[in-house]
Image (cartoon, rainbow, N blue to C red):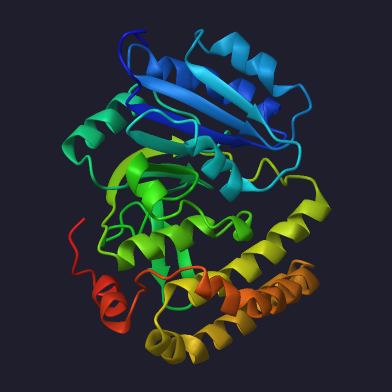
């Protein structure tokens, strides 16, 4: 990155026991950023000394910042903290277990130049399928959006999403009490309700997914708890009262189905704890957001695919 050229894109990555995967992915990021106005900001929520050597060995001097935080406040708080150190106009939230193609960041910057005021959902290749951003779902509420979806994403995924930095800050960033898993959907709902539309860039970036919980039964249960809790909080914060009342029977049936699935996975207790905790937090979480919320007309229009990609 030329020293005299201010960075236009900041790649923000929250690390958690990520050294083993970062040593594989970071070289692809550096190659993709070569010659481009890009900076890197890492927030390490499990600093054990293993990630800084990987970063130092790969990043050119002056192109990165490392911010350790041994309190582990979560993915949402990590991203928000990183934004306080970003000088670029746009930020790319990128999980450490995502590989970039050599032209990926060049294509991102081209998309930013074409539509500088909109978020951009980047395509990820996971489990043999391609997904780009987040989509609304009448039962699950939010899901990974298939890359060939007929409607545009409701918002970017936190694993690979570009935001105008000013827009991200103006909407309060990610809701920190959610900690992780679902906080990106919360932001997506809030942005969409305010009329902010998200572009899609189908890059098909290979994504290992789940490196932070793999092989750890305790963290797998914690993830199950957070997903269940945060789904309730997304609904409480992001939907108008008429839509909440209309959707309540569907969400109840959906959660019965999810409970059966979690029971087969041995995660029923963590799931039920999450639902209960979400209901207990719902009123306060709703008060924390005073902006616009998704209503019935907006939901129906989006699900019918009225909005062009």
Q: Is residue 97 left or right of residue 114?
A: right
**Observer-nearest of 227 and 67:** 67
Q: Total marks drawn?
A: 0
Return the residue nearer the eye: 182 or 285. Answer: 285
79 sits to left or right of 188 = right
Residue 117 figure quarter: top left
Q: Who's the residue at 36% across and 8% down the image?
A: 3
Q: Foreground: 233 or 82?
A: 82
x then y, percent, for residue 309:
21, 55
Q: Quadrant of the N terminus?
A: top left
Residue that appears at 57% across and 87% down: 252
The image quarter containing residue 104 is top left
Q: Percent x, y for residue 63?
A: 47, 15
- Does residue 248 sit above or below 295 in this rendering? below
- The answer to whether residue 71 is visible is yes
Quadrant in the rendering for residue 209:
top right
Residue 140 visible in the current orientation: no
Looking at the image, is 270 positioned above or below residue 160? Answer: below
């Amino acid at each position: 990155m030329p020293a005299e050229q201010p960075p236009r894109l900041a790649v923000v990555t929250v690390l958690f026991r990520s050294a083993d995967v970062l040593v594989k992915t970071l070289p692809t990021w550096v190659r993709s950023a070569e010659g481009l106005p890009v900076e890197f900001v890492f927030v390490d929520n499990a600093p054990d000394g293993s990630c800084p050597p990987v970063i130092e060995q790969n990043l050119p001097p002056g192109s990165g910042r490392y911010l350790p935080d041994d309190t582990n406040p979560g993915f949402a708080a990590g991203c928000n903290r990183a934004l306080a150190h970003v000088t670029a106009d746009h930020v790319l939230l990128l999980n450490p277990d995502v590989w970039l193609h050599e032209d990926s960041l060049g294509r991102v910057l081209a998309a930013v130049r074409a539509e500088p005021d909109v978020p951009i959902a980047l395509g990820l290749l996971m489990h043999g399928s391609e997904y780009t951003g987040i989509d609304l779902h009448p039962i699950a509420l939010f899901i990974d959006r298939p890359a060939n979806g007929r409607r545009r994403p409701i918002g970017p995924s936190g694993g690979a999403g570009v935001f105008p930095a000013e827009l991200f800050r103006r909407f309060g960033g990610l809701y920190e009490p959610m900690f992780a898993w679902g906080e990106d959907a919360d932001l997506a709902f809030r942005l969409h309700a305010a009329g902010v539309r998200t572009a899609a860039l189908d890059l098909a970036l290979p994504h290992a997914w789940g490196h932070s919980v793999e092989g750890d039964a305790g963290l797998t249960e914690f993830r199950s708890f957070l997903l269940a809790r945060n789904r309730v909080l997304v609904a409480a914060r992001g939907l108008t009262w008429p839509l909440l009342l209309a959707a309540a029977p569907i969400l109840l049936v959906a959660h019965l189905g999810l409970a059966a699935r979690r029971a087969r996975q041995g995660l029923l207790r963590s799931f039920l704890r999450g639902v209960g905790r979400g209901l207990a937090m719902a009123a306060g979480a709703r008060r924390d957001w005073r902006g616009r919320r998704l209503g019935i007309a907006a939901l129906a229009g989006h699900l019918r695919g009225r909005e062009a990609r």
